[in-house]
Image (cartoon, coloured by chain):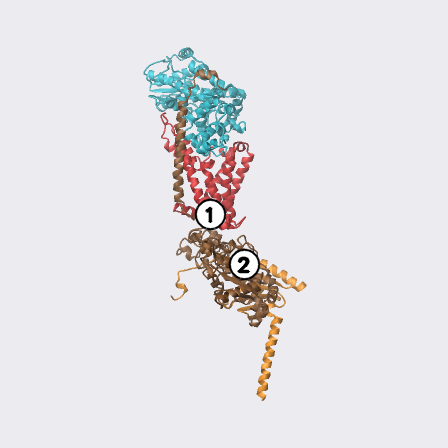
Chain colours: A orange, B red, C cyan, D brown
Amino acid sequence: MNGLDQIGVRVVTAPDDAAPSYVPALLREIEALLAELVASGRNGRIDLRSLPLLPGDDARLAALLGEGEVDAALEVTGGTRVRETGVAGVWWVTHANADGETVAEFIEVTLVPEILKTHPQDVRVGLTHLRARLAEQMQEGESDGE
Amino acid sequence: MSGPELLLWARGPGLQFAVAIFLFGLLVRFVELWLLGRKTDLSEARAHPMGPGLRTVLSRSVPMPGALKHAPLVFLGGYIFHFGFLVTLLFYVPHIHFLRSILGFGWPGLPPFLIDVLGLVTIATLIALLVQRFTDPVRRFLTRTDDYVAWTVTFLPLLSGYAAFHRLGTDYTTMLALHILSVELLLIVIPFTKLMHMFTFMLARWYNGAIAGRKGVRV
Amino acid sequence: MSTPAERATNAFLEQIDRPIATFFESCVHCGMCAHACLFYTETGDPQYTPIHKLEPMRRVWEREYTLFGKVKKWLGLSKPVSEAELKAWEPLVYDSCSMCGRCSLICPVGNDIVYMVRKMREGFVAAGFAPDGLKEAAIRSLRIGSPMGVTLQALTAQIGHAEKETGLTIPLDQEGADYLFLMSSNEIMQFPEILGAVAKIFAKAGVSWTLCSTAFEATNSGLQIGSSDIAAELVQRIVAGAEKLKVKTVISPECGHAYTALRWEGPNLIKRPYPFKVLHILEVLDDLRAAGKLQIEGMEETTLTFHDPCQLVRRGGVVEPPRNLLRMVASNFVEMEDPGIHNWCCGGGGGVSSNERADPLRLKVFSRKKHQLDKLGVSTVVTACSNCRNMLEEGLEHNHMQVNVVSLTEMLAEHLKA
Amino acid sequence: MANNETVGETLASRGVSRRSFLKFCATMTSLLALPPGMAEVMAETLARTRRQSVIWLSFQECTGCTESLTRSHSPTLESLLFDAISLDYHHTLQAAAGDAAERARTTAMKDNAGKYLVIVDGSIPLKDGGVYSTIAGHSNLDMLKETAAGAAAIIAVGTCATYGGLPHAKPNPTGAVAVSDIIKDKPIVNVPGCPPIATVMTGVVAHFLTLGTLPELDSLGRPKVFFGDTIHDRCYRRPFYDQGKFAKTFDDEGARNGWCLYELGCKGPTTHNACATVKWNGGVSFPIESGHPCLGCSEPNFWDAGSFYQALSTKTLPLSAHAGAALAIGATVGAAVGLASRAKKKAAVGKHARVTADELEKGGGA
């Protein structure tokens, strides 16, 4: 067997012009959340997986929002990508598992997505680690000086 | 009993029971009817009754001149209802599968949206015919309990089928089970009500056509 | 036999056969038959719905001849037919049904309703529930030989008149003649010209024919009242006369039910086929026309129409002969609305004309005929049934309409080539 | 057992960052259809909770459910869940054996009385005193009753534990029943499937851990969020069903085109599960996507619901024997009635009173 093309299977996907696109409604919702952020500073989040998006809808939405200044790649039990869209304050967050499969996808309307921030708990853990390392170094320095 | 259990019962023992009662009743009615017998007509025939009899079996589906004008709703309603009922029964793919599993052969179905539209039209027509039974003097006068029973058991499969098709009412599995049960109810009721006409109408038309036909009258 | 209800039930049990059971089984109470029935369309009264008129017999069928009826009877859920019920239904069966058979044509499941009405009357007459007029007519037929009490003397008197008028000899009891001509007492009493007309036509055509002194009355009160016993006795008289004279063909005159009685019911009533043929006078005339033996001169030019007698067309199959003959003699023949087998009854068939109690209803439902004739605006209506003729004349007079009613046979005789 | 440690502490000590934690919670809100804004709250709650004691009971089962849960591509977010719970008893996974293993169970029950979670896979045989499946000399029935008594809630995973499953299939030689047939006084969540989707199992546990409640259930005790829709409702091949395009065999044009598998016996329309949306093997595919009709494994009695390859609308039992008998009896009864009718008719003819002129004159009843 040389490749998949030798299997007599031809997959035809269902026609996608059956229902109107969900994108316009989604944009309205983003607009409302953004206005809320401006007015009261409250964060908003839309779960793209929970919406009946049609094939091509996410591409359409991405094209409409455009690309922004931030594109962060995180390594958090699988990859997570956080991009600010062309609309400042509107972020596109994609969570993947270790195999690279997307497991969740959100539009976040916020100043900084929560996942980018470092949690105080982790900071404490970091501090502990740093001090431990410093202590190690001091020890090494002392032994070097001897 | 949960939806899946109900469905299982409806497709299994329920169906066995309903089909058995249906066939039993059908045979009782036909045999008891047949054995009543009929005297040979000794008058000299103008034509052989067979041809005109068979002709009337078909031709009686066309209303007599003027009839459409005098009672449009009964005729049109009757046409639409019978057409809609038969087409949805015989050309909806899951129904064809059901019949194939019993008869051993099948035929191509119609796209579901056509069945959907037809089903709705049929339901509306049946309701109109019921309203007419209440309001029209002749229909109201003639109506007996039997007519309401027949209407109800005919209506239920349509209603439950439509609800199942559109995932209305309770969950699909239960609705499908109710739909099959309603068909079983219909099967059980057929031999004991005027619904027998679905079989005897051919014989009745044949007699009518044959009796007139041997006198040389095409009815 | 004891009570009337039991006598009626017994007669129903005798009459119900496979077609009747099929019809009852098939009825869906759609009520279409009402729209074919003169008595409903002209009154709007739902009790005149034809299938409803059969309810007592339907109940006997269900109760006695079906498993489920038997179960209901056993459980005490059904009652036998009662005398009160018979009394209530008698007017429906006799006054509001002219046995025209239109309902049998409209029924979508194909029920031959009039076939059942005919059989149901057996039960009513057996129980004594029949209109006085019909009973009296039947008694006169049995005892005197004619429903109107016409005797042989009356006939011979009319023969004398006709012979004088036409100058022809009218044969009576001539053995070996080809045709035996019958008359209805109505014709003998009210339209005797028909005898001369037939004599002239037959003489011209060279037809060998005769009248019979023991079998001249064609009408059959037994059929009208719905008693096979009486009908058989009356038919038997004609059969005996025809067999005595050894004729080849018996001619039924311009009368609707006489044709049905003799042509279609007769052999079944006497339980054997005839050794002769039965033809309606119009069939004989049409045969003569086809053979070129009916020569006509001068056409009737007024606009005229033809009233189809139910028993001739729908119940008898004589549809084309009157039209062939009319086209021969009338230049302005127009068809009525719903012609041929779909015609509307004059209102007086099936014994209604002999039932005085039914007169007001009969005249009321004449509105259908009035409507049909008004629509055409003709001054002459031709027919081929003396009873229809009577009913048309009465109805027209009642409605103050100026329309002539003419017998087709007479009209032909008038235009016979000299 | 480190049951006094909070989940946050445990995770931190294992080098799992709070970002992973947040990501897990965000994924769970998406999966459980919770408001997406709840992710942060969930993460904080979960971090502060003490690790949940879980007792996993395996009865008449094939270990497929455990396999489904553990053999997912690791490391996954699901595996995080194992860090968030204290799996105190699971006789397939635990290191301890024999009396030590059973002691672990009783200890956990005692220490966490009224608070521990019981997960059950496998059905419980009742026939012959439950001898067909025993663990350490205890029948499954006894062990279930004993363990359930102090539980906060029970999660029945797999079709066997939820409906009896394969052991329950006719003729059910061991008298197998579901957990819900025995335990009536505890909240039970049914997660059916043969096996159930791993994500669905973890989702239910996560819901309990983070919100402290069980998800909303349908009439069969299944979480509505995963079992609310049928496979058919969410199937990507649904448009073909609506258009009336069906594969008739496994190798025809329709099958190659990926048309609807209804005619090949697909039970999608009556099967409630999340396969069509959550999918299997890390979201790779699900049976219908691979060209095989849905078997309906997450519905009760799916083994006995007729052939897997016969359309859903068809009969499940043969009709000919009943039909034949009905016809024979019908013909006999009909003939009996018919012959009685003939006799009655003959008698009526015999009783016929001739209608005569005299008779008419007497007037009868008129």
Rendering coords of residue C4 (x, y %): 48, 21
Q: Looking at the image, is mark 1 or mark 2 nearer the viewer?
A: 2
Please tell me which residue lies in front, D46 or B105. D46
* Residue C127 % position (x, y): 47, 21
Q: Which mark is residue B9?
A: 1
User: Across the whole image, how many numbered discs are drawn on residues?
Assistant: 2
In which chain is the residue bearing label 1? Answer: B
Task: Rate crowding at label 1 as few (under 14), some (14 to 19) or many (20 or more) other CA atoms within 10 Å.
Answer: many
Q: Is residue B217 visible?
A: no
Q: Quadrant of the N terminus of chain D?
A: bottom right
The 10 Å Cα crowd at callout 2, few under 14, some 14 to 19, many 20 or more, is: many
Res B140 → quadrant: top right
Mark 1 is on which residue type?
Trp
Separation (CA) of disc 1 from disc 2: 32 Å
Q: Are marks 1 and 2 in contact (CB under 8 Å)?
A: no
> What residue would you read off at disc 2?
D148
